Image (spheres, grey):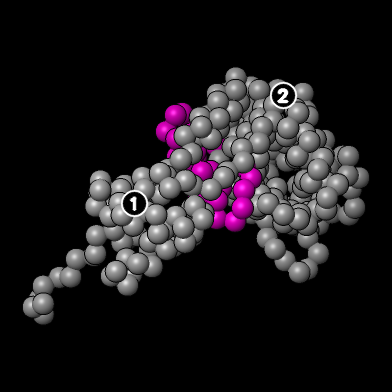
Amino acid sequence: MPHNEEKKPFRGTPTERWPIFVNRGPELAALADALDAVRASSRRLVLITGEHGAGKTALGDAFLRTAQAAGPVRICTGQCFDRELPHEPYYPFLDALMALDRRHPGLVPRTLAAHAPSWLALFPQWIGAGAGNVHAVRMFDELGAALAALSYEMPLIVVLEDLQWADEATVNALARLADSQIPSKLLIVATSCDGEWTAGVRAQDRLRAVAATAPRAATLPLGSLTLEHVARYIDARFGPDGLSELAPAVHQATGGNPFMMVNAVDSLVARRL
């Protein structure tokens, strides 16, 4: 190759492609229906479950893009972390509220001051001092009131990632919010991996029971991709019938796990195979 000739990326490299999304049409439709209900002031809780790499975050990201394109909406995300230290109560909600304040400066402190002073006291950067112990019921009630106020003008979508690592207080708060009859334009989307939860079996079972029976809640379990889905992904990435013969080997090697599938194809591309 001449020294002055610019080397073009190999076709199919991750840097030159848009995210490719396959086999989640029904789940996207269910999330869109939940947002439609929220726009009519009927709050919703949606749990997205599945094994690691099943595409829970990808589904949430795709939904958020469509939600923003459909009309005015506020969005914030709270992340749960797998930590050895004791988990701070309500940490995912605290993280989400801080994220919302970064998008809309001043909105969250004003709302907490008016509707959830116990929660405002948990943010020293806003009031200058921490709070003492507050009864759990009061924290639950104030959280519901604050989220209802934050979603009064337009829909608020709160995404909580990796709920399997959430503390018990967070999981119980979600169950109470799902059961609440207070009208609001609030949509909570929570993702969780299969297996044991940090909050314990009791809290896990309670939330799952509410999500399965409450009229304002739903669970979206994500399964593995079929051979046909893997073939669609490869066709979308490299062109129709470009590398279709690769699909069976990729499907067999990854078991249809979306994360493993993408990594496997990325590895083949990186090695120019």
Residue 40 place in picture, x, y as percent: 60, 19
Q: As shown in the figure, which amino acid type bears the numbered disc 2?
A: Pro
Range drawn in magenta: 48-74
Q: Residue at x 57, y 45 (%)?
A: 223
Relative side of 198 to 273, left or right: right
Look at the picture and state if 110 lies above or below 129: above
Q: Nearer the viewer, residue 15 or 225?
A: 225
Q: Residue at x 91, y 45 (%)?
A: 135
Look at the picture and state if 243 lies above or below 221: below
Quarter location, residue 183? top right
Which image quarter holds the N terminus?
A: bottom left
Residue 70 on the magenta span = yes
Residue 7 place in picture, x, y as percent: 18, 70
Residue 213 on the magenta span = no
- Note whether residue 221 is visible: yes
Q: Count neighbours of disc 1 (C-alpha within 10 A) and say few if under 14, some if 14 to 19, many if 20 or more.
A: many
Look at the picture and state if 12 lies above or below 73: below
Residue 68: mark in rendering:
none
Which residue position holds label 1?
A: 234
Which residue position holds label 2?
A: 215
Q: Nearer the viewer, residue 205 or 161?
A: 205
